[in-house]
Image (cartoon, helix red, strand yellow):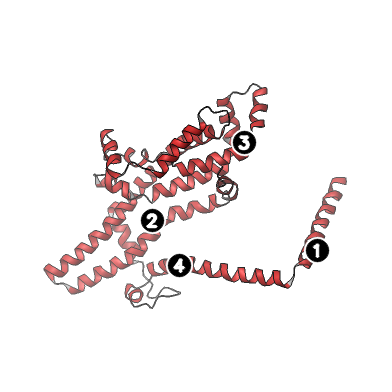
């Protein structure tokens, strides 16, 4: 009962404090808030409208899109673009490949990044500065495309999944963010207290550090996951067999092949109607492919967004 009374008094105190703070706001404060609101609303529209335009264009008649008639709602509603995308046999195979590459790649990224970041966050780690400088050098000076390709080739990883997930196993930027998170949230006193109870370094890392690092792990999953899902150039370089192509490479080939068929039909058959139909389908597919390839990221983002404040914001303060 006493506790309940104290809670009610505390809530009443907060309400009165809030009323006083609102009463103290001057007209200049309100004008400032209004200006900020207007600026942020304009920025929101600038960022959100292109995405909205892609969505409504994917459901619209391509002639209406090309004519500039689609602005706020779909015109000539059609699903031909999505139908054309999913008629391609390689799309579902590319989807499955990208899911596998992304899952395996993220597991490897976490397995390398988290232990490295934790070790470099510890003050008692011998040679910490030298190792950190070594990593920073690789961040600013890379080996280049050809040396990287030759290394991947010499390791026998050409035309395998490992060529897509192993070379980028550690992002130095993400490692620094995670290291700062560990330094901020895992004080040395916590380790010393655990050691007094007989806890070793490995046990402390597995049973104490990792359970307390949920936000930064979620952020790393998002960063690395988006990187792998949108990866296109690595597949173009290292994957030869079309059955192993990631989704982004499959989507690129679909657009290129449709454009080639359209050009060939004009030069050889002069079938203008068929060429016009292919052109319209290709225009629709551009928008539909963007939506299809973005769906997994849009599904994943709401579950991780809540960890941004505790994860990336705390870890982004470099030191």
Disc 4/disc 2 C-alpha distance (Å): 15 Å
Which disc, if any, is residue 186?
Answer: 3
Q: Percent from the top left, x then y, of residue 225?
A: 44, 46
Q: How many marks?
A: 4
Residue drawn at 38 percent across, 43 percent down: 141
The crowd level at tag 4 (other Cα within 10 Å; few <14, some 14-19, many 20+) is some
Which of marks 3 and 4 precedes in the sequence?
4
Disc 4/disc 3 C-alpha distance (Å): 42 Å
Report the residue marked by disc 4.
Answer: 52
* Occupied quadrant, residue 105: top left
Helix, strand or loop for disc 4: helix
Which disc, if any, is residue 293?
Answer: 2
Q: Percent from the top left, x then y, of residue 284?
A: 33, 67
Disc 3/disc 1 C-alpha distance (Å): 38 Å
Name, please, the residue furthest toward the right.
Answer: 2
Residue drawn at 44 percent across, 74 percent down: 73
The crowd level at tag 1 (other Cα within 10 Å; few <14, some 14-19, many 20+) is few
Helix, strand or loop for disc 1: helix
Name the residue nearer the viewer: 82 or 206.
206
């Amino acid at each position: 009962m006493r506790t309940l009374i104290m809670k009610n008094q505390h809530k009443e105190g907060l309400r009165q404090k809030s009323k006083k703070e609102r009463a103290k706001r001057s007209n200049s404060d309100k004008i400032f808030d209004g200006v900020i609101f207007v600026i942020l609303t304009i920025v929101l529209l600038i960022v959100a409208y292109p995405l909205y335009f892609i969505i409504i264009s994917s459901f619209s008649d391509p002639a209406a899109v090309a004519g500039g008639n689609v602005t706020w709602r779909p015109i000539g509603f059609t699903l031909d673009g999505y139908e054309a995308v999913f008629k391609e046999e390689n799309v579902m195979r590319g989807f499955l490949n990208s899911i596998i590459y992304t899952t395996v790649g993220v597991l490897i990224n976490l397995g390398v990044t988290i232990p490295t970041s934790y070790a470099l966050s510890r003050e008692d780690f011998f040679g910490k500065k030298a190792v950190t400088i070594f990593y920073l050098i690789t961040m600013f000076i890379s080996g280049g495309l050809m040396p990287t390709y030759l290394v991947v080739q010499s390791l026998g990883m050409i035309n395998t999944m490992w060529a897509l997930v192993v070379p980028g196993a550690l992002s130095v930027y993400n490692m620094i963010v995670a290291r700062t998170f560990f330094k901020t949230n895992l004080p040395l006193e916590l380790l010393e207290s655990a050691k007094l109870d007989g806890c070793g370094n490995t046990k402390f890392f597995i049973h104490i550090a990792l359970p307390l690092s949920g936000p930064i792990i979620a952020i790393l999953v998002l960063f690395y996951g988006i990187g792998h899902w949108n990866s296109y150039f690595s597949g173009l370089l290292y994957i030869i067999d079309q059955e192993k192509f990631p989704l982004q490479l499959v989507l690129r080939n679909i657009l290129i092949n449709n454009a080639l068929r359209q050009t060939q039909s004009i030069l050889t058959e002069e079938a203008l109607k068929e060429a016009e139909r292919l052109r319209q389908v290709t225009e629709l597919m551009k928008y539909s492919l963007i939506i299809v390839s973005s769906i997994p990221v849009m599904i994943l983002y709401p579950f991780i967004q809540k960890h941004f404040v505790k994860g990336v914001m705390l870890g982004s303060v470099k030191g």
